[in-house]
Image (cartoon, rainbow, N blue to C red):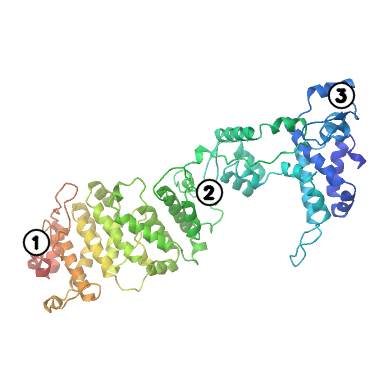
């Protein structure tokens, strides 16, 4: 241990040699020679690097003039008594030591910490059966001593210490990337799905830490072995993150921003597999006050799951999506909301997009959605289209999206929905649920949607070219007039023919409106099929092409009846 006298180069070289020359065999000798205590003393010198702690200029002058000697007794706040200058590591290595060190103080501290970790690994605390070994190994007893442990803790940066000081994303970044990458983020300006950090946030963090340890900083500068009386620092709240939702290792708002961050790599494809984990974040980390869960947070979670199921179909295909009950509830609540089209944060587009991606990812999800009565949701979405058709701007948007018309025809054919258009609606189970018979209730709502679309000539034309007439005409042939003439009381919940009759009548109304035969035809219950729309009368325009086709398929006589007779009379 004499090598640790007053020569910096020799002292550094000795530590390096310990670490390389059969270190496992030397561990016992190091412990028996008080080497652990010496290593801890050297560890505290990390505070001297880059002038974190300094020796007062007056002491330097006294040393240079001979006023101070190696045996001069000194004291600083935090020491348990007066000691010779040569026994105080900070003064010993700053005043007495000669030579040029091999490593700077920070690198030396890193090496020593790694050595202590290695030494502990040679003496485990548990046996092969995972039982605790008593007494505790000597190396761990020495490190746990009051003369060593506090100084080790003050030099180790752990997540438990950084948690209140840095944003959670920065701590994750430190864990997932090398130190150089973290340093680049910490000292720079970044605004990405994995890191939101700026000079302003860094300055705020420094100010908060400085205020918290204000009285300890000068004490540490005068005595590198001064012990910090631990007082947990309050969590630093960064205003820049008030509206951010952080999950796993990503800020969801940025992750979902396909314009700024398209195809941002996702490190862990299973991070949102269980929707319950994602919905835990609805307990609002946001500082905003909202009535119930923050809708912006819900949208971010839904969009993030859509990204996951879209990009990692192969990995997630064997699994069922666990969030259908809540997803279906969300869609129903949205479609029943009278303020749907005036909301600043509508959930319906994100919810229906997620439903599409889950079904498109795995056939198991299609079956699971059916079990959760998800087919009924398709009907709710059809109602949304019917309402949207009342507004001219919505009709213009529908005209720009021909897939909507095509998918509406798919509903009529299969009685279920096919999500091809994820921007607005939920059409998609069709491809995953082959083999089941049509669901007339869903088809009935789709027929009413066609009636609503008939208010616009261009929508009429798009529907015509998509083959809507064929689908509507098929329903007419399922009508049985004898059911009504029999006088038997029937309802749609218990009688399938009553459902078929109702669907046939609705289809007749839709055909009438598509051709522009009648201003406002009645539905089977006698009510108006389409109300006044956005201040404009709901009279559908005449469509000569559709009229000509209907006359050819139904005969001119029946086609003319569409404009004069009730559905029951025409049927």
Q: Nearer the viewer, residue 483 or 62?
A: 62
Q: Is residue 157 above or below residue 99?
A: below
Residue under label 1, please give it. Answer: 563
Mark 3 vs mark 1: give the one in front: 3
Q: Position of residue 418 (x, y in %)?
A: 34, 63
Q: Position of residue 402 (x, y in %)?
A: 29, 55
Query: Which numbered circle lies on residue 63?
Result: 3
Toward which corner of the image does residue 420 lie, by quadrant? bottom left
Does residue 470 appear left or right of residue 3 in this picture? Answer: left
Question: How many labels sit on residues?
Answer: 3
| Quarter of the image that includes the C terminus | bottom left
Residue occupying the point 45% across, 65% down: 362
Q: Is disc 2 in contact with disc 3, using a CB cutoff of under 8 Å?
A: no
| Quarter of the image that includes the N terminus | top right
Residue under label 2, please give it. Answer: 250
Mark 3 or mark 1, which has the lower sequence index? 3
Residue 278 appears in view: yes
Q: Is disc 3 in contact with disc 1, using a CB cutoff of under 8 Å?
A: no
Q: Residues within 10 Å of mark 2 (few under 14, many from 20)?
A: many
Residue occupying the point 78% across, 25% down: 56
Marks 1 and 2 sit apart, C-alpha to C-alpha, by: 59 Å
Mark 1 vs mark 2: give the one in front: 2
């Amino acid at each position: 241990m004499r090598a640790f006298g007053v020569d910096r180069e020799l002292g550094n070289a000795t530590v390096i040699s310990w670490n390389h020359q059969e270190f496992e065999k030397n561990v016992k000798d190091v412990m028996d020679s008080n080497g652990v205590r010496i290593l801890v003393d050297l560890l505290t010198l990390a505070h001297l690097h880059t002038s974190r702690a300094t020796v007062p200029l007056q002491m330097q002058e006294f040393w240079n003039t001979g006023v101070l000697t190696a045996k001069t007794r000194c004291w600083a706040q935090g020491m348990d008594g007066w000691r010779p200058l040569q026994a105080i590591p900070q003064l010993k290595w700053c005043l007495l030591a000669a030579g040029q060190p091999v490593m700077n103080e920070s690198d030396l501290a890193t090496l020593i910490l790694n050595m202590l970790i290695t030494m502990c690994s040679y003496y485990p605390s548990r046996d092969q059966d995972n039982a605790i070994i008593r007494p505790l190994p000597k190396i761990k007893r020495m490190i746990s001593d009051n003369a060593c442990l506090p100084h080790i803790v003050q030099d180790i940066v752990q997540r438990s210490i950084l948690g209140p000081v840095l944003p959670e994303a920065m701590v994750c970044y430190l864990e997932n990337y090398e130190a150089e990458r973290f340093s680049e983020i910490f000292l720079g300006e970044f605004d990405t799905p994995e890191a939101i950090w700026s000079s302003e946030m860094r300055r705020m963090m420094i100010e908060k830490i400085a205020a918290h340890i204000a009285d300890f900083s000068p004490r540490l500068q005068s005595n590198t072995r001064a012990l910090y009386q631990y007082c947990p620092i309050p969590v630093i709240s960064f205003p820049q993150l008030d509206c951010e939702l952080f999950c796993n290792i990503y800020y969801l708002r940025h992750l979902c921003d396909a314009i700024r961050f398209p195809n941002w790599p996702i490190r862990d494809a299973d991070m949102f597999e269980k929707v319950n984990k994602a919905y835990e974040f609805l307990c609002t980390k946001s500082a905003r006050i909202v009535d119930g869960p923050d809708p912006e947070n819900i949208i971010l979670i839904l969009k993030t799951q859509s990204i996951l199921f879209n990009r990692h179909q192969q990995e997630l295909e064997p699994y069922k999506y666990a969030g259908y009950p809540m997803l279906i509830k969300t869609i129903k609540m949205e479609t029943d909301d009278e303020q749907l089209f005036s909301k600043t944060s509508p959930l319906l587009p994100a919810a229906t997009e997620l439903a599409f991606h889950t079904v498109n990812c795995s056939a198991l999800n299609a079956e699971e959605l059916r079990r959760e009565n998800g087919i009924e949701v398709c009907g709710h979405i059809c109602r949304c289209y019917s309402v949207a058709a009342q507004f001219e701007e919505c009709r213009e948007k529908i005209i720009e999206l021909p897939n909507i018309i095509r998918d509406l025809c798919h509903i009529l054919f299969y009685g279920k929905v096919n999500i091809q258009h994820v921007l607005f609606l939920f059409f998609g189970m069709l491809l995953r649920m082959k083999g089941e018979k049509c669901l007339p209730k869903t088809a009935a709502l789709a027929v009413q949607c066609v009636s609503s679309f008939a208010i616009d000539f261009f929508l009429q034309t798009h529907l015509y070219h998509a083959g809507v007439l064929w689908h509507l005409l098929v329903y007419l042939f399922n009508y049985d007039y004898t059911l009504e003439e029999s006088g038997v009381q029937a309802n749609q919940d218990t009688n399938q023919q009553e459902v078929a009759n109702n669907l046939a009548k609705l289809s007749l109304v839709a055909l009438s409106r598509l051709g522009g035969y009648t201003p406002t035809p009645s539905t089977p219950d006698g009510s108006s099929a389409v109300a006044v729309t956005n201040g404009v009368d709901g009279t559908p325009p005449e469509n000569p092409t559709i009229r000509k086709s209907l006359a050819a398929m139904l005969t001119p006589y029946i086609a003319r009846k569409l404009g004069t007779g009730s559905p029951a009379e025409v049927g």
